Amino acid sequence: MIIFSLNLRGGGSRAKRKRVGYHIRKGDVDICFIQETKLSGIEFSVVKEMWGDNQVEWSYLDANGALGGILTMWKKDLFNLVFCFRGEGFLGLCVEKEGKLIYFVNVYASCDITTRIRSWERLCEFKNNNSKGSWCIGGDFNSITSLEERIGISTRSYKREISSFKEFIENMELVDLPTIGGKFT
């Protein structure tokens, strides 16, 4: 299964949406996580423009003014959608594929550390209060797990963030996959 994740930094431009669509088709993407759409009330025409055809399903979380916005798109008939869920800074799908439950979560975390930590706590609670299954969480966490991930920072200012993010990763039983391309992606 190929999953593509992108912080769009605004999806209002038709040219930008078409570029996204080009990469989705080129990569034969099955599921696409888009963060920072800066869009509300996303309609099929916008989704189709990004996906490239009408064989797509989607779920979205509206932007708040010119901030945020999350969109998850997936190939139609890829799996059976059980339900969608959402919270502050995340949008999720619970699906059934080949008799197994899978949770896909698209994250666009707040720049405010208190809000981020609250979102992570909600996701952990959600996981603990729902049926067992596999989890795939991607997106823009606005967090780091080591000081090497940020350039020119004070060690003291990021200790809480690093500790909290590592705790979230551990509690969710996640594996931090290596990135493809540049070191900072």
Image (cartoon, rainbow, N blue to C red):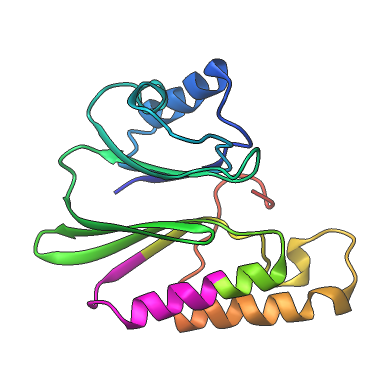
- Residue 173 at least partly seen: no
Task: Name the residue at 20% across, 66% down.
Answer: 101
- Residue 89 at least partly seen: yes
- 174 vs 15: above or below: below
Q: Is residue 144 left or right of residue 54?
A: right
Q: Is 128 one of the magenta-colored residues?
A: yes
Residue 137 % position (x, y):
43, 62
Q: Residue furthest left?
A: 99
Residue 88 % position (x, y):
52, 61
- 87 vs 123: above or below: above
What range is drawn magenta here? Answer: 119-135
Q: Is residue 103 left or right of residue 117?
A: left
Q: Is residue 114 left or right of residue 19?
A: right
Q: Quadrant of residue 132?
A: bottom left
- Of residues 148 and 84, which is closer to you in this image? 84
Q: Is 63 one of the magenta-colored residues?
A: no
Task: Name the residue at 34% across, 38% down.
Answer: 29
- Of residues 173 and 82, which is closer to you in this image? 82
Task: Name the residue at 60% across, 79% down.
Answer: 166
- 57 vs 109: above or below: above
Task: Name the residue at 72% across, 64% down.
Answer: 112
- Of residues 108 and 87, which is closer to you in this image? 87
Residue 100 % position (x, y):
15, 66
Residue 42 % position (x, y):
42, 32
